[in-house]
Amino acid sequence: MDFYKIKGGKKLNGEVAVSGAKNAALPIIVASLLADGETVLSNVPNLMDIKTITRVIECLGAETDYDAEKNVLRIRVENLRCAEVPYDLVKTMRASVYVMGPMLARLGIADVSLPGGCAIGERPIDIHLAGFEALGAEIDIEHGNVVARARKMRGANFIMKKVSVGATVNLMMAAVLAEGETVLENCAMEPDVVDLGRFLVKMGAKINGFGTERIVIQGVKKLSPASYSIMPDRIEAGTYLLAGAITRGDVKVNRMEPDHIGALRETLGEMGFRIENGKDWTRIIPATKLTGAYIKTLPYPGFPTDLQAPLMSLLTTVPGISVISETIFENRFTHVGELRRMGASIDVEGNMAIIKGVKRLSSAPVMMSDLRAGAALVLAALAAKGTTEIRRIYHSDRGYEKLTEKLLGLGADIERVKGGTF
């Protein structure tokens, strides 16, 4: 196993460009199954999750060709088929369940293993399944697989009992070819949902309201393949801003959408950092005086749960008391123990973390437990005294393209060492 070797204490300075959004790319890649022919996607990040989802759709009959240098993915669909996706693929990534929507829409049957992904909570797919049932599907659990069947998908009104990005995108894809009108209520409003909506409209779907709590879909008989550019990754953008903040550096993040991280920008400003914004960039400038913060993770446009762990690393270095309330996932403090190993002062009470800022973090051998917890450890190591070794970095490969190269470009002392053990 590779590992990171990071010598902390260097202020990051300079500019860094954001890659395409993983969480937007995954459902859009799956949505290509909704039409025969060739779909061409640009700004697709070269990540492990992207490689996994392309293997998933290949199992269903798609042909793919990815140009890693140009970040262009070509997908050709001619002989779509219902086939069992190997569990070894599905267990590594929750987004594999997204294939259910397109498969039901086109073939009237979907057979998918119960999904895996980061160990940050139960994340059940019951909302997805209830929505499919509302559209006319029958659901069975057979030998660890979810099997959905529908003679004909018909439009319906469906209210999600809880805001869910996954259920919103899955039901959008299921409904675009259903007969009649579908109205989805209590929908997720994340930019990733908007990006999928725009792609589906380009394919010929009739959708109104994506980006709001109410999405209305008029089913069409057929969609066509399309060319589309994936939006920039707001979580990656936020992570690099936090890297600048924790090292008290001056970092400009380019090729991003500032409005997509409004909650983070507001939080950093309230803490005392100076934030500047342009049309497609945000810059963080060191503060002369910092104060702690109270953060509550919420669905978009609230503070994103995916930035909770990286923000916690910053708060461990800020004077005073800070509090984080995690309302999205019940097991998203797995990074706390590792931060404590680096000298952080953090107490956890249920879904709340109380952080007391320390003068300096110190290096220690640590392990990543999931993608965003891994980002938190990298940020902590950048600020810590001494050299930190971080194991199980395959988690970061799932969501951060060229992480080592981008941090080196900002002046970090980081090395990816081959063949480490843990």
Image (spheres, helix red, strand yellow):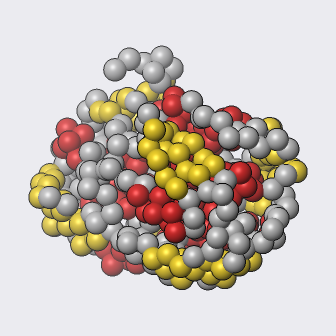
Tell me the residue at 24%/72% (across/down). 294
**Picture residue at 57% right of the left edge, 80% below the top:** 183
Q: Quadrant of the C terminus?
A: top left
> 252 or 333, which lies in front?
333
Residue 35 in the figure: left or right of residue 173: right
Could you say which is closer to the camera, residue 414 or residue 234? 234
Judging depth in this view, the residue of 214 and 275 nearest the camera is 214
Image quarter (top left, top right, bottom left or bottom right) of the N terminus: top left
Above or below 258: residue 33: above
| Rendering quarter of residue 150 | bottom right
Percent of width and height locating residue 161: 38, 72
* Depicted 125 relative to depicted 182: above or below: above
Q: Is residue 114 above or below residue 128?
A: above
> Residue 295: in sight, yes or no?
yes
Looking at the image, which residue is at 59% across and 52% down?
149
Residue 330, position as x, y percentages in the image? 26, 56
Residue 77 or 254: which is nearer the viewer? 77
Q: Can you give x and y, in whole percent of width and height, for residue 419 in the image?
A: 48, 17
Q: Classify 233 as above or below 420.
A: below
| Image position, residue 239 (x, y; %) | 46, 56
Q: Is residue 43 left or right of residue 123?
A: right
**In this image, 380 relative to 39: left or right?**
left
